[in-house]
Every structure is written in structure tokens, then in C-alpha cells.
Image (cartoon, rainbow, N blue to C red):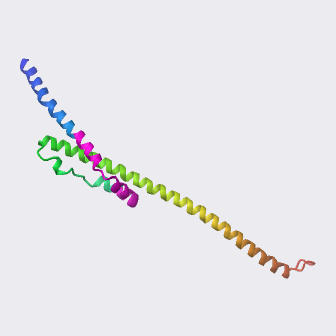
Amino acid sequence: MKRIISLIIVFAIVALPISAFAENACEQAKADAKRDSQWWLWTGAGCLINIIGVGLAYLLKPSPPPERLLGKPSDYVTAYTDCYVKEARKERAGKAWIGCGVAGGVALIGTVILVISAQQAGQACGDACGDAIGTALGNACSNAINCNTGW
């Protein structure tokens, strides 16, 4: 029984620093991924190429700069890289969705403006043409119709 308790204590002493080490690596990776996300690039991609930009944000695998991993233990490198890739994809995709939404909003506003302009132009044209056509038809009809007989 003493051996089992001793093994549990040794395992706890060894495992806790490793998990804390990996957690620290992950927190650092998340902060670095947010800082490295290039918001202008991914927002622009979402805005200009819409859903393709969003797809690229998910598909392209980001990699952390190698200088951040030099001299680090392999556990740290693995934890850092996994967390960095996950967070960088999340950041890129979020920014691409924002760009896609901005482009959609601009397109919607532009469409509404064009429809309103077309309606106003059509109404103005109809009013102008209607007056001219009505006057021309009125003159032609009054010349053709004898007011006394109706024909």
C-alpha cells in the first residue's frame, strides 16, 4: 500500500509541473496568435473574395515563427504549436467573417440605393413621357373624332 501511495505522490509531483508547463505554453501561444493574426489581410480577404477568404482562413495552416521555439523542450514546442495553430485559425476565420459581413452589408446598401434610384428614374421618365404621349394622342384623337357623331 505504501508503494502505491508513493507512486501516486511521485506521479503527482512529476505530472503537475508538466501540465502547468503545457498550460503556460498554450496561453503564450494564444496571445502570440492573436497578435500575429494580420487583421487587415484576413478582413480584406473576407471582404474581397467573400466565402473563399473564409475558407482559406480555415484551410491554410498557420505556423508559429521558429525563433519563438528555439531552445524550448519538445513538450513545450508541441503544446505551443498546437495551441498556436488552433487560435490563429480561429482569429483568421473571425476576421474573414467580419470582412465578408462588411462586403455583404455594402452590397445590400448599394442594391437598395440602386433600386430606389431606378424607381425614381422610371417614375420621372413615365411622368415626362406620359405627358408628351398624352398630349400627342389627345390631339390625334380630337382630330379623328367628330365631336357631333362620336366618329
Between 151 and 17, the residue placed more toward the observer is 17
Q: Which quarter of the image is occupied by the C terminus?
A: bottom right
In this view, the residue farthest toward the left is: 3
Residue 14: image x %, image y %? Answer: 11, 30
Q: Residue at x 19, y 42 (%)?
A: 79
In this rendering, the answer to whether 21 lies above or below 13 is below
**Residue 41 inside the magenta-drawn segment:** yes
Q: Residue at x 40, y 54 (%)?
A: 99
Q: Residue at x 81, y 76 (%)?
A: 138
**Residue 60 inside the magenta-drawn segment:** no
Q: How many marks?
A: 0
In this rendering, the answer to whether 122 lies above or below 141 is above
In this view, the residue farthest toward the top is: 1
Between 17 and 55, the residue placed more toward the observer is 17
Q: Quadrant of residue 136?
A: bottom right
Residue 87: image x %, image y %? Answer: 28, 45
Residue 64: image x %, image y %? Answer: 21, 50
Highlighted magenta segment, given as a residue range = 26-53
Q: Quadrant of residue 19?
A: top left
Q: Residue at x 20, y 46 (%)?
A: 81
In this view, the residue farthest toward the bottom is: 144
- Relative horizontal placement of residue 5, taking residue 80 as reference (left or right): left
Q: Magenta residues: mostly which secondary structure?
A: helix
